[in-house]
Amino acid sequence: MKLNRDVLKIDAKSMEQQIGKFIKDVFIKSGSRGLVLGLSGGVDSCVATVLCARAIRADNVLALLLPTSSTPKEDLDDARYLVEKTKIRSYEIWMDPIVDVFMKSLPSQKDERLPKANLIARCRMVCLYYYANLMNYLVVGTSDRSELLIGYFTKYGDGGADLLPLAHLYKTQVRQMASYLGLPQKIVTKPSSPALWPAQKATDEIPVEYEILDLILFYLFDAKLSPDEIAAKLQISRKIVDDVIRRNRATAHKRSFPPNMLSPFSSNLELNSSL
């Protein structure tokens, strides 16, 4: 069966205007002097960078390039290219020495990959907020809706931000925006990866490739179909749909404030418990 991907098609020109207005409104209302974001060279951060540079004065946007020894050279090259193209300001800060200080200072019985990877993401967040505090800037997060809904981000790492201009766009829609904005094809189609360890690929860690994942998420959250209906419509295993639902529920804590006496378990990004 040929999948109907038209349900995820967007009017990129209108979307740019909407996101630009959102960025500018938040920026003005905050009273801040600029925006700072992490620019990895991936499609999400590249799209967010271009949108920020177009929404406000480019010289009020600061990009931090925060590579590690695991960062592919082409990603760093693409990030440098975009800095030059958008004429924004940037700092390049190698994270290995910063992370090494933590690893040497923290008593631990073993060096596990995932905790260290999350530490890298949180160190990047610290760098972003250092410059935000120093310069009275806002931190722009670059996560898309696909990643947010399945919790594929680090809590208080890349999830730590003051605004999320791409939070309503699925990954495949971000790629549509990248094409519209004139980004090089190698960035538009680049496989997603947090690059927190060598050869890390998002597709090795998510339930299914983004082209299918985005359709599952659309039918769950936007069309409100049942898991059985989605599995039949996409001709996929019900187990895949259930895995997406499980990830959404298991990562609810990442998308809401910590439980408190006023609102212990509130969240507006979760599925109805009857599914």
Image (tube, helix red, strand yellow):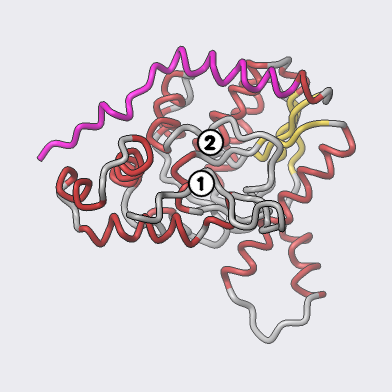
Which quadrant does the C terminus fall into? bottom left
Q: What's the magenta bit mostly, secondary-structure-wise?
A: helix
Instruction: Residue at 56% x, 21% y: name it.
Output: 19
Quadrant hosting residue 201? bottom left
Name the amino acid, label 1: Leu
Question: Measured from the top left, where is residue 189 in percent x and y?
Answer: 39, 36
Residue 191 belongs to magenta span: no
Give the left or right position of residue 59, taking residue 253 as reference: right
Check contact, mark 2 vs mark 1: CB within 8 A.
yes
Instruction: Residue at 77% x, 21% y: name it.
Output: 29
Image height of 112 relative to 186, above or below: below
* Alpha carbon distance from label 2 to label 1: 7 Å
Q: Looking at this view, is 147 or 98 the one in front?
A: 147
Q: Which residues are magenta?
A: 1-27
Mark 1 crowd level (few <14, some 14–19, many ≥20, 10 Å Cα): many
Give the left or right position of residue 267, taking residue 6 as reference: right
Residue 12 belongs to magenta span: yes
Q: Tag on residue 148? A: 1
Instruction: Residue at 72% x, 39% y: name it.
Output: 64
Q: Does dot 1 land on a helix, a strand or a loop?
A: helix
Q: Which residue is mark 2?
A: 167
Quadrant hosting residue 122? bottom right
Image height of 201 relative to 59, above or below: below
Image height of 169 relative to 123, above or below: above
Give the left or right position of residue 262, taking residue 178 as reference: right
Name the amino acid, label 2: Ala
Question: Measured from the top left, where is residue 77 in percent x and y?
Answer: 58, 38
Mark 2 crowd level (few <14, some 14–19, many ≥20, 10 Å Cα): some
Q: Looking at this view, is 62 or 266 the one in front?
A: 266
